[in-house]
Image (spheres, rainbow, N blue to C red):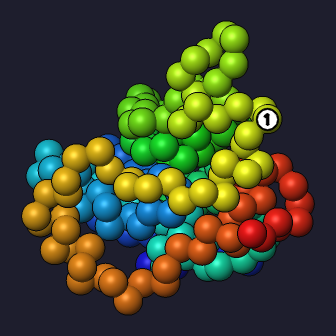
């Protein structure tokens, strides 16, 4: 399904099942279909599952607008309003978890019944107070480091059913890291390598 945000970007999402709402958000460059196994499990347990591709990912619109984590949170807020979801359980991987953190910063946490953060450091930059930043990202190296491909998005091999499901959607638009570089760097103008 498609939802048009207030800044006119189409967000691709699915909304299946009934019961307590669970929202799934994948990491940077991912597609909502990566949650295939978890979605099936949640449906079997009687949950309503909302799963979406962030702008510039999967089947959602490609744009230079809104390349900020707070805009991603606003997209989620607008979609949940459209679907009349008052409370939900949040499950986010990497950037998906960051989107939920931004959502709570903007809209409070009253609508979130619980949250599962998968593989998102609470602080991306490694420094004297935190040695566990993303791939030893520092204030000095982050502009150039973020231009380097991140590598595999999953630590373990994908389950066969997920792999087959992802193969079935290979015609989905490819993720454009250059389009989203300013999302990381904080600049307003993309700096392409």
Q: Nearer the viewer, residue 32 or 185?
A: 185
Q: Is residue 27 left or right of residue 154?
A: right
Residue projecting furthest to the right: 188
Locate residue 92, reporting x and y percent.
Answer: 44, 43
Locate residue 47, reporting x and y percent.
Answer: 25, 48
User: Can see residue 84?
Assistant: no
Q: Nearer the viewer, residue 13 or 145?
A: 145
On screen, residue 107 above or below 175: above
Q: Which residue is drawn at 54% across and 47% down?
A: 95
Quarter of image, res 31: bottom left
Residue projecting furthest to the bottom: 171
Q: In which quarter of the image is the C terminus?
A: bottom right
Q: Nearer the viewer, residue 33 or 9?
A: 33
Q: Nearer the viewer, residue 49 or 154?
A: 154
Q: Which residue is drawn at 59% across and 31% down?
A: 136
Residue for badge 1: 140
Task: Assign a secondary structure to mark 1.
Answer: loop
Q: Which residue is drawn at 64% across and 41% down?
A: 103
Residue projecting furthest to the top: 129
Q: Is residue 26 left or right of residue 133?
A: left
Q: How many labels does the image show?
A: 1
Locate residue 13, reporting x and y percent.
Answer: 45, 69
Locate residue 90, reporting x and y percent.
Answer: 43, 40
Q: In this view, does 25 lie to the left or right of 19?
A: right
On screen, residue 147 above or below 98: below
User: Can see residue 2?
Assistant: yes
Using a 10 Å C-alpha cutoff, classify the residue at mark 1 as few (fewer than 14 neighbours), some (14 to 19) or many (20 or more).
few
Quarter of image, res 48: bottom left
Q: Quadrant of the N terminus?
A: bottom left
């Amino acid at each position: 399904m498609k939802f048009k945000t207030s800044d006119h970007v189409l967000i691709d999402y699915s909304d299946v099942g009934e019961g307590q709402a669970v929202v799934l958000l994948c990491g940077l460059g991912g597609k909502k279909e990566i949650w295939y196994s978890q979605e099936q499990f949640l449906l079997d347990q009687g949950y309503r599952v909302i799963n979406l591709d962030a702008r510039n990912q999967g089947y959602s619109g490609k744009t230079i607008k809104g390349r900020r984590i707070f805009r991603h949170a606003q997209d989620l807020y607008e979609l949940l309003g459209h679907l009349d979801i008052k409370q939900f359980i949040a499950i986010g991987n990497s950037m998906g978890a960051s989107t939920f953190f931004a959502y709570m910063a903007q809209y409070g946490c009253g609508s979130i019944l619980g949250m599962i953060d998968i593989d998102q450091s609470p602080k991306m930059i490694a420094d004297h107070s935190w040695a566990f930043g993303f791939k030893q990202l520092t204030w000095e190296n982050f502009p150039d480091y973020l231009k380097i491909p991140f590598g595999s998005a999953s630590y373990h091999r994908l389950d066969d059913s997920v792999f087959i499901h992802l193969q079935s959607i290979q015609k989905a638009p490819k993720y454009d890291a250059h389009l989203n570089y300013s999302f990381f760097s904080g600049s307003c103008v993309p700096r392409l390598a």
